[in-house]
Amino acid sequence: MKAIAYNNFGNTDVLQISEQAKPSVQSNQVLVRVKAFSINPMDWKIRKGEMKLMSGSKFPKNTGADFAGIIEDTGSSVNGFKIGDEVFGVVKNLMKEGASSEYVAVPSYLVWKKPEKISFSQAASIPVVGTAAVTAIEKMGKINPQTTILVNGATGGFGTFLLQLLKQYGADVTAVTSSKGIEYAEKWGANKVIDYTKENVLLQKTTYDIVIDLSGKMGYKNAKAIMNTKSLFLNPTPQPIEIPLSLLKNLFTAKKHVVVLSSPGTNYTNILLNAVKKGVDIEVHKVFSFEQYIEAYQYAEKGGYIGKIAIEI
Ligand SMILES: NC(=O)c1ccc[n+]([C@@H]2O[C@H](COP(=O)([O-])OP(=O)(O)OC[C@H]3O[C@@H](n4cnc5c(N)ncnc54)[C@H](OP(=O)(O)O)[C@@H]3O)[C@@H](O)[C@H]2O)c1
């Protein structure tokens, strides 16, 4: 089978289409013929060697974590799925495996039936960012319509889900986005929108109960200026050292630094499938073909778009 893989850490030029053995299923696995997989910032962070501690340095590496496709085979102990089912899912080890191939074999607990009303590219855009959004809301603790939340970087994949899920709580959400994202942030439920190309959110007088930074550019130190005395700063892009350090630092300050690390699973996906049923928007900005993989990754890494980028096979 064909796979997009790489043999060294680096920029998009290390990616290539290579021939790999088609996987066969273990008893608890399903074999999926991949129709689409989506691109996440994690893909290029791993490829550039920025996450070596977790990804390891074993090559070749495939890329892309979440996918959608059609079941082609099921292991002997798999229940609830049959050949021909349209599904979406995620690879087991997000740091070491990839879905960028014509077939993937994954445990059946990491695969869910694809709702008919969404495309393969939309379904492949759910697990990583959707789970991250649900995890972030869990970390926020009790929220109500009076809770003021600032979402910095609100119209990427993660923000798309976060804004729409937060709307269900009626929280008072301020979204920070580029000019292009304003109408989307409003549509997805933000009470207020700040255009970061025109206004520096750190220089305004308002403070928030919760600040979540999805751009990876704000940082806890800067965010303190717009936090209340007992605010939370949610960080889904921590440096490895920040994970233990934040626990220690939190002992001495009321302004807490909370790391968000998510891992897709059935509980989260049921919440997301329910949200899809209720009509949550899954914005896929652009779909590339398998052969356009370099262009797709260059486009995704450059940023400046709303929602997700997907590759269809
Ligand atoms: N910890 C976890 O479990 C977990 C899970 C999923 C994702 N993540 C991380 O969470 C982050 C967000 O993920 P994502 O998929 O949403 O990424 P994304 O689609 O690239 O979104 C990032 C957003 O940040 C915005 N942005 C860029 N510069 C900004 C600035 N100076 N001020 C405010 N906003 C700015 C971008 O807008 P423009 O493009 O318009 O500039 C974009 O909408 C990534 O770093 C990802 O790796 C972590």
Image: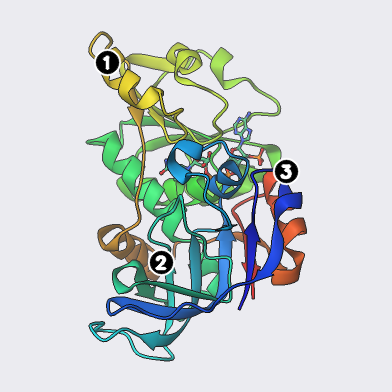
| Up-down relation of residue 226 to residue 125 (above or below) | above
Q: Residue furthest front?
A: 58
Left or right: residue 110 versus residue 309 is left
Point out which mark residue 302 bears.
3
| Up-down relation of residue 48 to residue 249 (above or below) | below
| 98 vs 177, nearest the viewer | 98
Question: In the rendered structure, which amino acid carries the disc numbered 3?
Answer: Lys
Question: In the rendered structure, which amino acid carries the disc numbered 1?
Answer: Leu
Left or right: residue 257 versus residue 128 is left
Q: Are marks 2 and 1 in contact (CB under 8 Å)?
A: no
Tell me how many marks there are. 3
Percent position (x, y) of residue 56? 47, 44
| Up-down relation of residue 114 to residue 97 (above or below) | below
Ligand 1 image position (quadrant): top right
Q: Residues within 10 Å of mark 3 (few under 14, many from 20)?
A: few
Point out which mark residue 248 bears.
1
Left or right: residue 110 versus residue 294 is left
